[in-house]
Amino acid sequence: MSFRIGYGYDVHQLAAGEDLVIGGVVVPHDKGSVGHSDADVLLHVICDALLGALSLGDIGTHFPDTDPAYKGIDSKILLRETWEMVKSHGYGLSNVDCTVCLQKPKLKPHVPDMRSCIADILGVDVTQVGIKATTTEKLGFVGLEQGVSAHAVVLLERQS
């Protein structure tokens, strides 16, 4: 196949005393994501979307939270390793489009740094990385500031 599409979705609980890392960027806030790694919800969904596009399972298959080697790991490392898997299958990135759902804080000021970080890891132009942020209008676990969620879609193209 010339093109492959993948989709990713992830959720992390928010808690005081944790860092809020999104898209490889530490976002100042009084709560942060809880997880086995650094709990970067955005990098996790991109990993899942990339793996899904090639029917390679999900992030938990390749980097299980039962493995102490991944305890506290920087998710940028996970994305780099995932990207190497994609390239080894002969695919390159056409684009990735993401949405982060978070009630507070506002992410707009941090989006350019997130896009740059992700583009750098994937070795693509920043114009190939789209990130949007939204609230849930105070509805659900995101609206109640109990968690953060994210979605990502990737389009991969076979490299000749």
Image (cartoon, helix red, strand yellow):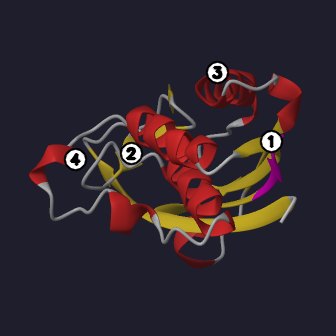
Q: Label 4 sits on what residue type?
A: Tyr
- Which region is colored magenta? 154-160
Identify the mark nearer the N-term, 2 or 4: 2
Identify the mark nearer the N-term, 1 or 4: 4
Nearer to us: label 3 or label 2: 3
Residue 122 image position (x, y, % from top left)? 64, 31
Is label 1 in contact with label 4 (beta carbons under 8 Å)? no
Mark 1 sits on what residue?
A: 159
For this rendering, which residue is in front, 31 or 159?
A: 159
At 70% from the left and 27% from the top, the residue drawn is: 119
Say which element carries label 2: strand
Residue 70: which disc? 4
Residue 123 image position (x, y, % from top left)? 68, 24
Residue 78 image position (x, y, % from top left)? 41, 42
Identify the mark nearer the N-term, 3 or 4: 4
For this rendering, which residue is in front, 17 or 122?
A: 122
Mark 2 sits on what residue?
A: 31
Is label 3 in contact with label 4 (beta carbons under 8 Å)? no
Residue 10 image position (x, y, % from top left)? 53, 66
* Quadrant for the N terminus in the image: bottom right
At 36% from the left and 66% from the top, the residue drawn is: 60
Is residue 158 in the magenta section? Answer: yes
